[in-house]
Amino acid sequence: MDTLIHLVEYFRDLATKHKQIEGFLTGEDYEMNDSLHQYPLLYLQLPISSTVNYNLTGDTMNVTLVLSVLTNIILDENGNEVIIREDSVETPHNQIGFVGLVAQDQLLNNSFRIINEIISKVDYDIKEGELLARIVNNSIQTVERVTNNDLYGATLTLTLEVENIYACTFMDAFDI
């Protein structure tokens, strides 16, 4: 299977199996229409970038994926889901009040926890041989007020070293 398609399908499957994630989306930022989605959502941002590791065979490449967990849902003290909207957390002076700050904190904490669960699962699957890759680098960053100002989350920039199934010598590709 194509390496990039395999990685997209891997993360789609991971999102489907996660107990809290309600959806999976790929695309560019402008393609997100948040009114069509349920949250929390795992979003794989396109384009995916890669760098061939030039050695004798070019048999591996580093693929960098940008994955975000976006949400507008927190749990209240009774465990019920509460959707947080910009207008529900602002004061009359258009400043975010104390309740809004607590809600934002909960949104960011929840997203950060989910993104850490994802990186832990990727690491586990690599060690178990379920994902043929090696983690080269990863970093996590919080994101606030995405698309419609109501979504908060965490973004994982993940670089994996994978087999370069596209590797060949230039002699194979050209009539020389």
Image (cartoon, grey):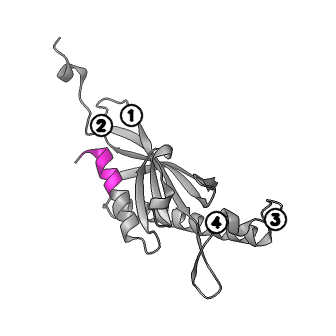
Where is residue 168 shown, x and y percent of the image? 23, 29
Residue that badge 4 annotates: 85
User: What's the amino acid at mark 2?
Assistant: Asp
* Magenta span of residues: 2-9
Taking the spot 32% from the left edge, 45% from the top edge, the residue there is 4
Q: Does residue 165 appear to the left or right of 7 in the view shown?
A: left
Of the residues shown, which amino acid type is indicated by label 3? Pro
Residue occupied by mark 2: 59
Q: Element type at marker 3? A: loop
Q: Nearer the viewer, residue 173 or 31?
A: 31
Q: Position of residue 16 (x, y in %)?
A: 37, 67
Q: Is residue 169 magenta?
A: no
Q: Secondary structure at mark 1?
A: strand
Label 1 vs 4, first from the N-terminus: 1
Q: Tell which tag, 4 or 3, sits nearer the viewer.
A: 3
- The numbered mark at residue 92 is 3
Q: Which residue is mark 1?
A: 53
Q: CA distance from mark 4 to mark 3?
A: 15 Å
Identify the amino acid type marked 4: Arg
Identity of the residue furthest to the left in this view: 175
Q: Residue at x 50, y 57 (%)?
A: 34
Q: Which numbered mark, 2 or 3, is in the foreground of this view?
A: 3
